[in-house]
Every structure is written in C-alpha cells, then in structure tokens.
Amino acid sequence: MSSPTIARDLTGQVRLIGAYAVAHGGNSDIWKGECKSQDNPLCQVVAVKVIKSHLLPDKAAEASYKLRREARVWATLLHPNIAPLLGIASDLSKYGGPSLVSPWYPNGNLKQYMLLNHSHLSFRQRLEMLYQLGNGLQYLHTSNVVHGDLKPGNVLIGNSGEVVITDFGLSRILEVAGFTTNNIHGTVRYFAPELCIIHSDRPSRTTKEADVWALAVTATEMFSLRTPYEGATEAAVVLYVSRDKGHLKREHYNEITDNDLWSLLERCWRFEPNRRPTMDGINEFLRIKRNAYDAKRHRQAGCGVLL
C-alpha cells in the first residue's frame, strides 16, 4: 500500500480576514483568509475551515479528529472539478487543532450562484454544470472515495463558471481499514432511503449509490431553484423516501422538460441501491446528451433557426 498523501503545513502563513465567519457548520466555521507562503509571496485569498471557538474540550477534540480525518481524504484528491486542499494551519484555532485551507471561490456555492444568475443560464449551460459535477463525483468514485454529503451548498463555482465539489467532512475511503463514517449528519432532503432507515444491528453508512441519489436531487434544484420536497418537514421527508419508497415527482418540476434527463433522474432514485446507475453510466449519458444538444443547435443555426 502506498504511503498516505500528507497535506501541506501552512502554519504561520495564513491570517483570517474580518471579525466574523462567513459560513457556519456543526463544529466548524468557514472564514475568509489570506495565505502568503515562502514560495508564493503574493497573497492568495483562501477559505479556512476552523473549529468553533466556544466548544467544550471534548467536543473540540472530536472536531479536531474529524478535521484531520477530512484532510486525510481531501489531500489525496486532484481533479479540475474537486476544490483542492491547499494545506493545514495549526495556529488559527484556540484549541490548536487543524484548520483546513482551500481556495476562495467568490461566486459562492451552487445554490447562491443559481439564484443570482438563473435568468440568463440556458438549459445547455445547466447541463454543462451538471456534467462537470458528475465528472467530479465520477472521479471520487473511481478513486474509491464516497462524498457522503453532496448538495448545492457543497458545490462551488469558479471564476470561469467551473463546478467544483468541496466539503469532505462526511467522506470516506472505501477498502481502508478503520476508515468509516458511522454517524450520518448530512442534509436529509438529499438522503437516499437506505440512509433514512435505522438498522438495529448495523449503522447506516454513506455509499456510492447514495451519492448518485443526492446528485439527482441536486440536479432538480439546479434546474428549478426550489428546495427539494418544498414545504415538507425533514421528518416527513424521511418517512416519504424510506417507508413510502417515494422520490421527487415530475409534476412538481415543469422546468425539466427533457424526457431523457428526467428518466435518468428517476433511475437514480430507484429504491434498491444496486439498481441505480453508476457515475460512469451517468456521465456517459450526460456527455451524449450535451453533444446531441450541440449538434441540434448547429443544424438549426444552419437553417436560420436559433435556440
């Protein structure tokens, strides 16, 4: 087995900007910061994930462990549609634990970006964004990594509109002894039914198949801008997808007019995990759909018709 990738030590090279965090999680906050390293004297604007300052010692120790575990997964990943981990700083938290440093994405997350730009984003552009998101998830699965918390809030948009996946706090590396996530703490509106069912003999664990379900739910939000299961409580969502074997229904998503795309989403929501498509199959479909759409546009443009 090859030695694990070690994240770069950025201790003493990062400072936080502003008096308040820009986003908040369970045990950690996201701060805007600046990084100035020896080999890069120019300041780089960064995002810094720091343990909350008010935690009790036992909670802080747990948060520190989870951040180190997240860094262990994140440091192995290198792909255009995965936000890179720049390194770890150990001097930004009052507890001395690790703070994770990554690039700052001024366009925000997918949800924020879609809300601000939806009026001029075409179907083709959204399809491209979904394809890029699929590329990132396909890379993770090929690398035997399960994300575990895929949703628009964990997808960032780069300066050129590129889509990158971030937040690997619930991720796990398959086939590595002792590397599991037994407690599910993600957002239930993106949960596959098997994550909503409590087993007395074994804990629920995130899987590639659950990532596929979450990708399809995220896709509906990309095209409709609406929260999944809008108006329902989280408890009602859990019962609907687990007990009633339900999923999002097309009559609530008139914005998705492409029959082939909706058919793909429904296959991703099959109740039995082993009947869902793999990311290889999903991305092949999206590639073909994208190319066919472009070919149709070129033909119609040649006839003087523009889509």
Image: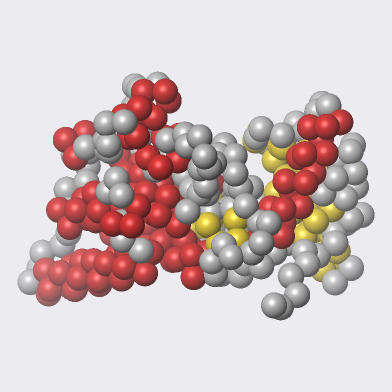
Where is residue 19 drawn, in percent x and y?
80, 31
Which residue lies at the image location 76% right of the left edge and 52% below the top edge? 68
Quarter of the image containing the C terminus? bottom left
Q: Is residue 229 above or below residue 71?
A: above
Q: Quadrant of residue 305?
A: bottom left
Q: Quadrant of residue 108?
A: top right
Which residue lies at the image location 81% right of the left edge and 65% below the top edge? 8
Where is residue 304 drawn, in percent x and y?
10, 68
Which residue lies at the image location 77% right of the left edge and 46% below the top edge? 65
Q: Residue furthest bottom?
A: 2
Q: Is residue 234 above or below residue 206?
A: above
Residue nearest the viewer, comparing 121 with 157 = 157
Residue nearest the viewer, comparing 170 with 307 = 170
Can residue 139 be seen here? The reply is no
Q: Is residue 87 above or below residue 300?
A: above
Where is residue 173 drawn, in percent x and y?
60, 61
Q: Is residue 111 left or right of residue 275?
A: right
Where is residue 238 drawn, in percent x and y?
39, 30
Quarter of the image containing the N terminus? bottom right
Q: Is residue 123 left or right of residue 90?
A: left
